[in-house]
Amino acid sequence: MKYAEIEWRDGQPYSPDYEDIYYSAAGGREESEYVFLKHNQLASRWQALASGEQFVVAETGFGTGLNFVLSMQAWAKQADPEACLHYIAIEKHPVSPVDIKRVASNWPALLEAYDELLSVYPLPVEGEHVRTLMGGRVHLHLVFADVVEALESRELQADAWYLDGFDPDRNADLWNDRVFSLIEKNSGQGASLSSYTAAGFVRRGLQAVGFEVEKVKGHGKKREMITAVLTDKKQRQSKTPWYVLDKTKYQGKTAVVIGAGLVGLTTAWSLVQRGWKVSLIEKHKHVAEEASGNPAGLLMPRLSLDNKNDAQFYCNALSYASHSLDHLQKNDEEKFWFHDGVYSIFKKGKAEKLINKHGYPEQFMTILGEHELQPYLSGQDITVTFFPEAGWASPRKICEALVRACGPSLQLINKNVDDICKVDNQWQAVGKNGQSIAAAEVLIVANGVGVNQFNATSWLPLSSVRGQLTEIPVSESSLTLNKAVSFDAYVTPEYNGMHYAGATYRVGDDNPEMTQAEQDETMAHIEQCLPGIYKKPERLSGRVGFRPVSDDMTPVVGAMPDKVAFSEDYKELHHGRPRTEYPQARHLSGLYVNAGHGSRGICSSFLSAEILVAMIVNEPLPVSKEVADYLNPARFLMRKLKRAQSLD
């Protein structure tokens, strides 16, 4: 994906691809406020919101961000301070930060809001990018994708729509019956809509899908525009009812999280940012005592050629994790995040295939020719790439920073949980002799390799994988390499007098002690790729950790399905009945899981926490439905049921 090509004509941004302007040079701001804010009656609707309520605005075409910035400013003045605006904008051709900044210079009163937008503006990587602004009062969802693809894979329940693409005569992909139908699908009953256009086929198309459309006076010299209200919301049966989520509204904002590693703490942090109080239970004396206790590790995505959901999840996870770590580091005195980019070494040809397959921009992944890493490399048939948004960090110190960021809303309880059970609508973490350690309507199991130790989660196909991290003493030559390098192993720059390299991968090995064989294996990988740079340690030095990995090597994130109900409701699935005839999934209400992140936890945990918490509080998901389904724990049950296999 590339930034939009823009020509500047008399100070006005113009798209040569669509032969149309982004906004009117005369009165662009006033037109936006008139068409979208005024004719969706947003002032009165926002003033009527109660504390804690949310409102969803959806826009077709983010463009230069003008509508968003104006909406954010109006929200700050008109909505309750505890209400939350979710602004979801779909954009196929993202405008570059340089061009957005130039646009912002036209309106001095908007510069502060534009600066906040630009401070979190993502790279043009396909998928959804969620950013929090105004101290959590506004969640911006930028969906960089084709509008049909984006709307087909989401269930937004929008309260208001801004139809703001280029002129219908010049942008048929955005103005057609399929798009109108998808807008209705993604709207809540009574959703409003406005647009600067009054084209007859647009009015008829919206009327055909259930909107009551009205022509009103346009802005300035424009004679007419349209407003609309959805009065006939269609009922649809899901094609995958086993992945439909409950819409439970929990009475209190309290939760129990089991596990104080990176996954448990990112989950707690996401809840705390929404005003929840969290009891975090950890069997060890301190946080990050197991795999998350490593002194250093890489933030890098997993790049898949053939699995679109996997590739999209990890690329969007990299963007969100990098953004989250920037935020944490900015507000913390202790250095734990090194946003310096990562060199990654591929076998010849693979990097080119990845870029061509997924359209990665050079700001995300670039192939290097003559570069600073070249003198260190051996003469292999390889390609060197650079990931500017990647980096390396101390997982242990991230966990400690997350505890500080949560503040008094987080209660850390150092006890061992023997089991979990539900009593009087409360999930309880139970210790020795059956005593209750903590209880709440919501309980999240995130205790790494111990996730399937409880009766309710015992069927989850998660196993423990042993990994060994090696500490390498610094040398004169090693200090010259100031960025992390990823290959068959990885190695970090100097940190606290050491380089950290790893990590090995041993399935079914429960040995907690370091072994010379694995240290030698790691050093052999390094010497083969970067010969003569790093000194071989004179003794065993490093750390062993055990990482939870699912059978399909993908994280497990979502509501816990009721296995007994699934076996009853979907037992005939293998006979080929239409999917729409099956009932909606039944879950163990209030119980959730976040696990199986393996060796990519620094990358995947932040976005996974946001996905899970969005499910809990009924917010728009920060990923497509396909990606959420890809992570859903029910996938393991459905694979068996489709093959007529027993769930016992």
Image (cartoon, grey):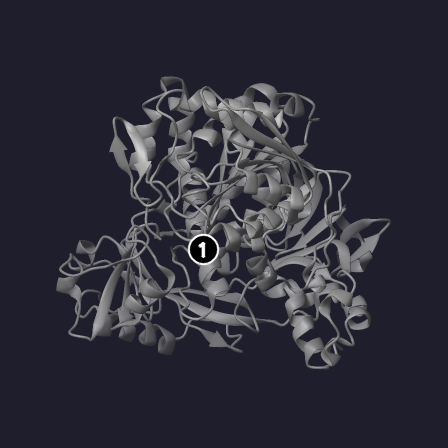
Residue at the image point whose x is 68% and y is 61% from the top: 243
Q: Nearer the viewer, residue 71 or 35?
A: 35
Q: Is residue 252 above or below residue 368?
A: above
Left/right placement of residue 378 relative to residue 62 reads left
Quarter of the picture containing the C terminus is: bottom right
State the image quarter where residue 191 is shown. top right
Residue 109 in the image, given as x and y percentages of width and height: 40, 17
Residue at the image point whose x is 68% and y is 64% from the top: 240
Residue 140 in the image, given as x and y percentages of width and height: 51, 38
Q: Nearer the viewer, residue 206 or 59?
A: 206
Q: Is residue 159 above or below residue 391?
A: above
Residue at the image point whose x is 32% and y is 45% from the top: 17
What residue occupies the far front of the structure in this picture?
200
Q: Is residue 194 above or below residue 314?
A: above
Q: Is residue 557 visible?
A: yes
Q: Nearer the viewer, residue 507 or 8?
A: 8
How many numbered dots are placed on residues in this image? 1
What residue occupies the far right of the structure in this picture?
424
Report the amino acid beneath label 1: Cys
- Name the residue carrying label 1: 603
Secondary structure found at label 1? helix
Q: Residues within 10 Å of mark 1 (few under 14, many from 20)?
A: many
Residue 576 in the image, given as x and y percentages of width and height: 72, 78
Q: Nearer the viewer, residue 109 or 619?
A: 109
Q: Is residue 288 visible?
A: no
Residue 242 in the image, given as x and y percentages of width and height: 71, 64
State the image quarter where residue 587 is shown. bottom right
